[in-house]
Image (spheres, rainbow, N blue to C red):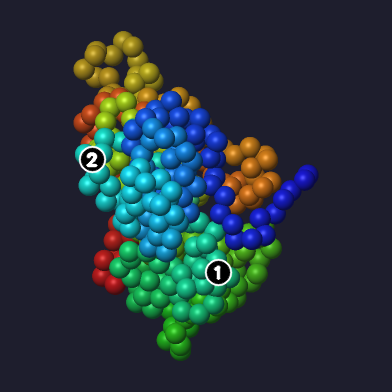
Amino acid sequence: MNATINLENKHFPVLLNELVNIISPLYGGTFIDCTFGEGGYSKKILEDRKNKVIGIDRDKDVTFYANNLVKSFKNRFEFYNLKFSQIDRFKKSKPKAIIFDLGYSMNQIYDKQKGLSFKSIGKLNMKMGINDFSAHDAISKLSKEELNKIFKFFGDEKFSKKIANRIDLERKKKEIKTEDLKQIINIVKKNRNSKIDSSTKVFQALRIFVNQEISELLNGLINAYNILPVGGLIAVVSFHSLEDKIVKFFFQSYSREESVSRYLPEAKKLDKYFKLIHKKPITPQKNEINKNPPSRSAKLRYGFKIQEGCEFTELKKKFGYLTNIENLGLKL
Ligand SMILES: C[S@@+](CC[C@H](N)C(=O)[O-])C[C@H]1O[C@@H](n2cnc3c(N)ncnc32)[C@H](O)[C@@H]1O
């Protein structure tokens, strides 16, 4: 295999060609890039002079990249430092497509101040931008039962209870920093032989909790549907299984008319709000994974809005147990 490892902290836009193939038939109008990052998607869309882009990102550190595009693509690019759950304010822009590329850019992962990676040291943080509390607040103030829930449901961590108990013990002696949390996990899990680092799951769980990623995703998708004109498209690139589960349910549960018996009376047919072209997600080709190994877990799903009026009751209900856990953050 001729793998080129990404040695610099360079961010490669994931599944860029695949995304362009999907959205280019809609070119000639406004596109909303909900996760601007380093602007890889936005820049590509702006290369077609018929397009305008509204870029959104919760991390104000990306303003540097956004300002470059403002200069290069005068009057065709605007940037807003917002969370994508707040896109309802762009309804008047009548977007052709709304795009989400979930997760973190390489710059964020390697940013020592943000402390998103278990390779960081110092005070626990994990804030992506526009946050109400940090990982330090969560680790020092939540009960061990609450921490257990976070590790279990957001990280699928088998040792969640033991890790939460150990944190509770250690935090009575001293402030738990990033390196201490990693050590606690190593002690509990006894450095069990595993393909992934023993801290991966707990750190993922804490990142999701601190950034309220489940509530953001649910509200982001629902608001995207609400502001999108019929005929428009929503495309989402996800990176972990929890995100993909939500995205899959969002598209597939509301596009199911064909699975209902044709003998059912018309009124009983499920309403159909999206037209899907693929049932399975689009994933990166081998050459992209070789160039950018973290892309291997990316999944792209998309759908065209074909009807107004979806309330997403089942979606909210199905994932309510996760938003309830995120709501533990309200008291921090
Ligand atoms: C994987 S990067 C996007 C990379 C981008 N597609 C590119 O080509 O450079 C994800 C970006 O989404 C942002 N982000 C994540 N969750 C967000 C949210 N709820 N609201 C707004 N921005 C968010 C992160 O700050 C990060 O910059």
The answer to whether the beta carbon of the residue marked 2 is less than 8 Å from any atom of ligand 1 is no
Left or right, 240 with reference to 89: right
- In the rendered view, tell whether residue 285 sits above or below residue 115: above
Of label 1 and label 2, which has the lower sequence position?
2
Q: Is residue 20 visible?
A: yes
Q: Which residue is located at x 46 percent, y 70 percent?
A: 114
Quarter occupied by residue 164: bottom left
Q: Which residue is located at x 34 percent, y 52 percent?
A: 79
The answer to whether the beta carbon of the residue marked 1 is less than 8 Å from any atom of ligand 1 is no
Three-letter code, disc 1 = Phe
Left or right, 119 with reference to 37: right
**Quarter of the image with the N terminus in it:** top right
Residue position marked by numbered label 1 in the rendering: 118
Three-letter code, disc 2 = Lys
Could you say which disc has been placed on residue 91 in the image? 2
At which x and y percent is residue 279?
47, 28
Q: Residue furthest bottom?
A: 173
- Cα gap from disc 1 to disc 2, whole angstroms: 39 Å
- In the rendered view, tell whether residue 220 sits above or below residue 235: below
